Image: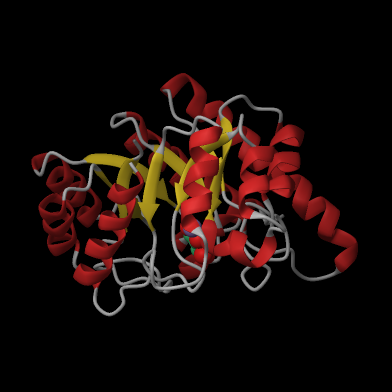
Amino acid sequence: VFKTSMALSPLPAQFAPLLFAGNWREGVRAAKELGYDAVEVSLRQPTESVVAELLRGIGQAGLALSAVATGQCYLHDGLSLASLDPDVQAELRSRMCRFIDLASSRGALVILGGVRGRLTGDPSTFLAQRARAVAAAREYADYAAPRGVSLAIEPLNRYETNFLNTLREGMAFIEEAGSQNLGLLADTFHMNIEEPSLEESLKGVRNRLRYVHLADSNRGAPGQGHSDLGRVAQALREIGYDGYLSAEILPLPDPRSAAAQAISYYRSLG
Ligand code: LER
Ligand code: MN
């Protein structure tokens, strides 16, 4: 049986597939009523007062915190793992350490997805930017390890970034960083665009898979698109994956209906 989670944002986000964005109280209530085990939170500033309220609300509802997602640091503030600017590196490191602290007290993992940014400017600097991203991931992993936190690298499709698009590339990045507590997040929406086979790609990273965003091909709730998610679930069972299936999905036709459709699908798998 897979554990279930729903991706929320306490603030309106420049990133569409988050349920109840800007309305976390309703989101936590819906997660509880629909029977989710956990919520995943997408955060921008760890020090914002809404973050403490949100974490309290999740605890009071008896829900677990599955993961802290960090892409808003890049989308809103341009802070990227690949940045060669020392000021950006320092600001991002300070936010990431606080995110890891938040995750640590609750057994959550921290997602390194959109926060990797993009390789920009003169292509002759791309290798240096990528090397910086590897070094940053290693630094955060070293901070996270004694706190019992794992970090998950999330490959994203080519329209969102120009590096780390496939699970295999994510695996190579992790091997370069050489940290034991770096793993992979497989998001079936991105995989539908980038992977030759969803099932075979998952089997190829079986030892490093830590988290799954299970959305349909069009990023709707499972059932709204054409991905064969039954086969994906079968592959996850075969590799012994026992982590979360998290609903990072578009709020269509509305957040509550999308959340309900996702959990009823997740339940049908288990
Ligand atoms: C984040 O989990 C994600 O999947 C991306 O599309 C964010 O840019
Ligand atoms: Mn995702």
Tell me where residue 269 appears, x and y as whole percent.
36, 47
Tell me where residue 32 appears, x and y as whole percent.
13, 50
Say which residue appears at 31% left-offset and 60% top-offset.
Answer: 262
Residue 86 vs residue 268, the one in the foreground = 268
Asked if residue 197 can be seen in this view, the reply is yes
Residue 4 vs residue 23, the one in the foreground = 4
Quarter holding residue 248: bottom left
Say which residue appears at 69% left-offset and 58% top-offset.
Answer: 195
Asked if residue 87 can be seen in this view, the reply is no
Give the left or right position of residue 135, taking residue 32 as reference. Answer: right
Find the residue positioned furthest to the right.
124
The answer to whether 114 is drawn above or below residue 238 in the figure is: below
Say which residue appears at 72% left-offset and 65% top-offset.
Answer: 162
Give the left or right position of residue 255, taking residue 46 as reference. Answer: left
Colour setup of the view = secondary structure
Say which residue appears at 49% left-offset and 74% top-offset.
Answer: 218
The number of numbered discs placed on residues in the rendered structure image is 0
Quarter holding residue 62: top left
Give the left or right position of residue 267, taking residue 145 as reference. Answer: left
Q: Quadrant of the C terminus?
A: top left
Tell me where residue 34 appears, x and y as whole percent.
15, 54
Find the residue positioned furthest to the bottom.
253
Residue 169 vs residue 224, the one in the foreground = 224
The answer to whether 173 is drawn above or below residue 223 in the figure is: above
Give the left or right position of residue 116, taking residue 64 as reference. Answer: right
Q: Quadrant of the N terminus?
A: top left
Tell me where residue 225 appears, x and y as whole percent.
46, 73
The answer to whether 46 is drawn above or below residue 196 in the figure is: above
